[in-house]
Amino acid sequence: MATRTYSLVIDGVAVEPDSRYEVVNPATEEVVAEAPEASVEQARAAVGSAAAAFPSWSRTSPSERARLLDRAADLIDAAADELVPLVQAETGATHRTTKTIQVPQAAARLRRYAKGALEPTLDPLPPAVMPATVLAPGGVVNAAANRVPVGVVSCITSYNFPMVNMAGKIGPALAMGNTVVVKPAPQDPLAVFRMVELLQEAGFPPGVVNVVGGTGIPASEAIVDDPQTDMVSFTGSTGVGRRIGEVAGGQMKRLLLELGGKGACIVFDDADLKAAIGGIASVWGFHSGQICTAPTRVIVHRSVHDQLVEGLSAAAAFMKVGPPTEKDTVVGPVITDVHRSRIEGYIAAGLAEGAEAAVGGGRPEGLDTGFYVEPTLLVGCDNTMTPVREEIFGPVVVVVPFDDEDEAIGIANDSDFGLYSYVFSGDTSRAWQVATQLRSGVVGINTIQRNHEAPFGGFKQSGVGRDGGSYGLAAYSEIQGLVWPS
């Protein structure tokens, strides 16, 4: 891969950063390239640029916004031969994940919100017959709810799907007429910097899309606490989300926070075990478990517990761990050595608390270079154990048995998290009723598959707000009530 220079983009101009730092390939531990490290002053300049661009951009026609978003998606697709190896190098994602999800889904999300820009923003309401008061004479009063852009949106994303997550923020924000300041994750920001360059090439006016980056906290906080920032959209850990809430709350900024997950997957005794095992296994090692929607907390009826564990153990034999550039690799490395140590710490805590490793538990043999972790299945677990309660964000699944429906629901809901859960049962009526009792933003019923038009977000410590489909357009807008006489 040819080494190139990446720059900040502020007010439509490439800006030399305050300093640079190395981005490391998690599979080879080699340097991919140097990424820009913005100063606090540069971060504030980016916010100022977005604020200056907002009045004009917010008045552009929906068709113009749609045209530019479609054009940006076309440019991403055209640059796939460049972007795929870049994303793979900085994320450690497997060949299949990078080629089918990491890059093309970013373009798909921009196209979805090109269409979204054309969706109606005005919702007429029934007229109201109002009696005369000391404030106004009586009469029939009309009203409508009008969605308008929020203003300047700071978009901050996690490292697992850098382009896709950012496109899922940029797309609806721009479609609604907002301007944005983009801040990618420090571990793998390069493709996001390149994506912003492509947005500039597509023709977005100066200041509409700005990008800063870096590892330092002060510059990140600057784009959150700047008085000209109207909204913060963040995907990442609950700890960071809490800090953003503290900083932004004092200024009453709009927040969209998609935070940690500890997906409960209830498997009843009448479930299609083949489907349940296949679904859990497919996500177990997907992107090395670095996905917030994974069913990592399997809650299974005691009568089928051993069959499920046996099936998952057998599935692990087909989860090849290895270099992500090899086409038959299923599980690549995790993002950093520090994160690998964190995952290993959770596994060790579980074993010390009485769990057993039915599969894995260590580092794969023959892979001395790269940040690899074996797919691990912990059994003999209960809801008090550390790896059952904490988000691990790695290829680790825990199994907790239950005896009746109420106990299953109680175990599932006994968590600080509530992002994405699952229910498997042959009785779809029961599965539906159980799903509605789970304190979870999304529940999959007999499927691991997503529907990207569904509202997405979490209960409890898993976040605030909803995006996805048209809900994403609502998330990046304010509702204005318009009232007039007949």
Image (cartoon, rainbow, N blue to C red):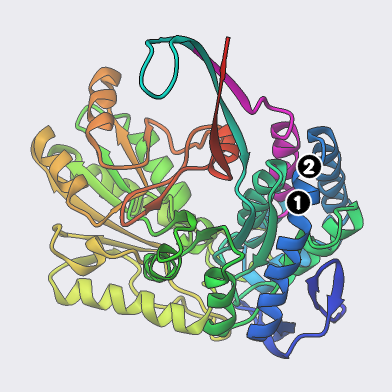
Residue 59: numbered disc:
2
Evaluate whether residue 1 shows in this view: no
The quarter of the picture where the C terminus appears is top right
Residue 55's label in the rendered image is 1
| Place of residue 285 in the rendered image (x, y in percent of width and height, measured from the top left) | 47, 58
Magenta-colored stretch includes residue 117: yes
In screen coordinates, is 353 left or right of 35? Answer: left
Q: Are marks 2 and 1 in contact (CB under 8 Å)?
A: yes
User: Which one is in front, 438 or 278?
Assistant: 438
Start-end of magenta stretch: 103-126
**Location of residue 415 with respect to 45 vertically, above or below:** above
Furthest-bottom residue in this view = 19
Query: In the image, residue 20 lies at what x, y percent?
Result: 72, 89
Amino acid type shown at disc 2:
Arg
Q: Is residue 284 left or right of residue 265?
A: right
Q: Is residue 485 above or below residue 261?
A: above
User: For the residue labelled by badge 1, is the local secondary structure a helix, a strand or a loop?
Assistant: helix
The magenta stretch spans residue 325:
no
